[in-house]
Image (spheres, helix red, strand yellow):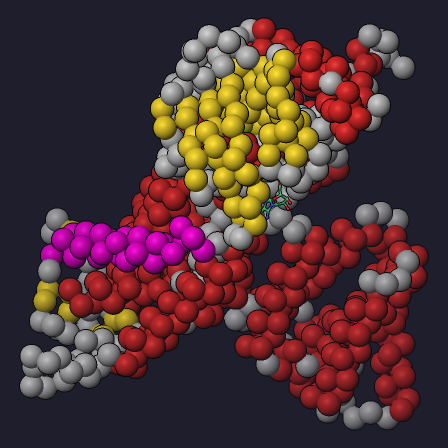
Amino acid sequence: MSTTPEDSRGIGTDEWVAQHGERAQRGTGLYARIGEAWMGLPSLVRWGIPLLLVVLVPFAGSNDYILRIGINLGLFLLLALGLNLVVGYSGLLDLGFIAFYGFGAYAYAALASEQFGLHLPSLLAIVIVVVTTAAFGFTLGLPSRRLTGDYLAIATLFFGQMFVVLMVSSDAVQFPWMDEPMDLTGGANGISNVDQLSVLGFTFDSNLSYYLLLIVLVVLATVATKRIHFSRHGLAWRSLGEDSLAAQHMTIPTVRLKLLAFTLGAGIAGLAGAIFASVQQGVYPSTFELPLLITIYAAIILGGLGSIPGVLLGAAIMTILPELLRFPEYSNWLFLVVLILGTIMYLKSWKLVPAVFAGMIAIGFIANVIFLAIGVPYLTTAEWAKGPLAPVLGSWIFMPEERVLIGNIAFVALVVAVAWMSLLTRRTTIILLPFVLWLAIFTWEVRLMLEPSITRQLLVGALLVVLMATRPQGIFGKPRVEVL
Amino acid sequence: MTERTPLLELRDVNTYYGQIHILQGVNLRVFEGEFVALLGGNACGKSTTLKTAVGLVTPKSGSVLIDGVEVTKEKPGERIRRGIAVVPENRRLFGPMTVMENLQIGAYTRSHVPKEDYDYVFDLFPKVAERRNQLAGTLSGGEQQMVAVARALMSKPKLLLMDEPSMGLSPLLVEQSFELIDDLHRQGVSMLVVEQNANMALSVADRGYVLQTGRVVLEGPAADLAQDAELRKAYLGR
Ligand SMILES: Nc1ncnc2c1ncn2[C@@H]1O[C@H](COP(=O)(O)OP(=O)(O)OP(=O)(O)O)[C@@H](O)[C@H]1O
Ligand SMILES: [Mg+2]
């Protein structure tokens, strides 16, 4: 015991307890060490490296497809940063957020297209759009004075859905003072031929120009939120999301801050919407439906609510991952890499790794022998295996002719096996692991590769589940601690 | 007692939760420099009295005055800005934020906080200083209590309202925390402390009130209350 009798009276003076904080922060292992080295860099470098990479993308000989993904990512980042103010900081579960994005897009389209014959200068149109969307956000925020949690979620979800319905159905609105019904929104077809942005004589007419514009906007929004984060008011904001009653005790104007969050968040979404409308040169109601809302929530939760780098990374993952999985040759690689890395991380022991993978390979060949012995009809390697991994996988995986049927059986078996494995001891799990790994790759090649679009969603979903199960607080989020 | 204006006064307050009549004509005063203990059994309305004082519930009739100013219609923030600070029941720290951030929020009323003010609470609570970068939610109960008091002090209050500061503390720590509260009182902070531990509270307080089902049934100098036979029987357990 190194504690003196005198101070052992107090709390936390025990050596071990006293060092708890440091220990918790220090962490061990490779990740912790990489993380520490990274955090040790000056923040200008930490933020500068990713920014430099992003700016250089178009100059590294890229094509329009990649720029389009970049533009989507930029819009998505803006939305995520805006939503983070509302959900991450103020703790308001706003499920109507996408309506602000849609409102901004439609408002810009109305002000800058043939729909009403208006072609306002871009800057003026954008200012009007941002201000009206912010005002709309303020209005939708009003119920948040009384409603919180689930109730606010239901109310805002209703508004969000109503927005889409209104946009679809407002193509023949009969005003009492008009003879003919008026087309406000173009109905299900939306509004097309929206003007491109044109600021100070420069017209944004290429993907590259929008890409660079969005980089600037995202950087500005990030810097602004980062400044808010550590300011007195940012602190107040975050405390409000944490415990609004305690925040009131600290004289924090909770109502005003909630409304401010709604207003600012909506303003940012409105800006993103306006840019979206001009990038696409059109707006369509289906863009603003539930899937987008779910994806954006997934992004900010995945990254860690309330954390700025987390929000950025989460948004990047949710935009880029589905694109990568669009191509079978990438998704094949990605699947195998994730599977192997996941296994290594689970085993946490270099000795077991070769044994498990050797077992997996052996089981593959044994399965081939069994399938052949039973006489299952099969396809030759040349008939199915494509891409760089073909020579390897082609000779190892048995490809039955009945891909759908056998694949389905394998898929069900895999799901059952994985679900049950969580009940077993580590020892039994490791013994079964080679079989399950082979089954996973078999299912992937035989069945899932047949339908890349479904597989894509399955894989993204599975990845989210795994991530959230291992890190419930998100990648950069702080673990939730209950104050008792 | 001379006719000074009390820092805090409840005048004939009747508070309801829905149909339930909780505080039934409560009168209570805390003068500058005083240490007042508010005692009573479970569910007699002690916390409700504090909530009425701060404005988290509005009384149906009666009034609340701070420094002689009628504040019954004011919101909690406005009242607290008049120089009150609260250590709420169960402490209610901001768990995922660091201790330092909790202190900064405590000082929210003030746009500029000189470094000396942090040094002042760090001097009072060396443990808090040690843990300033730890997440408040990961502190032990006793440490959390210190941070809750430190956070309340950051607004430089004239009057500190505390709801059961000894809750969940070991007997040794209860004693320590009361010594600390007593120190603060000597440094000029007036106190209204709700407490289950009547012995301990009366040993450091100037005056006390005893609540029973929403009514003040006893009040007087702490020393007298400590001797009061009836109270001893009912609350002190001997
Ligand atoms: N929000 C509420 N709604 C309805 N009833 C309430 C509410 N808050 C408190 N009460 C009731 O009011 C009564 C007094 O509660 P209060 O919290 O003031 O008790 P207390 O004296 O602080 O008790 P304890 O010492 O156990 O904390 C209790 O019967 C309680 O159930
Ligand atoms: Mg109580």
In this view, the residue in front, A77 or A237, is: A237
Residue B13 placement (x, y as % from top left): 48, 35
Residue B186 placement (x, y as % from top left): 58, 6
Q: Quadrant of the rendered structure where residue B124 is?
A: top right
- Provide the residue span drawn in magenta: A121-147
Q: Residue at x 24, y 79 (%)?
A: A170
Vertical comparison of A143 with A482: above or below: below
Q: Residue at x 10, y 80 (%)?
A: A176
In this view, the residue in front, B222 or A26, is: B222
Q: Quadrant of the rendered structure where residue A328 is?
A: bottom right
In this view, the residue in front, A52 or B119, is: B119
**Residue A130 located within the stretch drawn in magenta:** yes
Q: Residue at x 52, y 71 (%)?
A: A326
Q: Residue at x 90, y 84 (%)?
A: A370
- Please count the marks in the image: 0
Residue A106 placement (x, y as % from top left): 25, 67
Residue A258 visible in this rendered orientation of the protein = yes
Q: Where does ligand 1 appear, by image quarter?
A: top right
> Going by the image, does A156 lie left or right of B230?
left
Q: Quadrant of the C terminus of chain B?
A: top right
Residue A242 visible in this rendered orientation of the protein = no
> Going by the image, does A9 lie left or right of A129?
right
Residue A117 placement (x, y as % from top left): 9, 71
In this view, the residue in front, A139 or A389, is: A139
Vertical comparison of A321 with A162: above or below: above
**Residue A283 located within the stretch drawn in magenta:** no
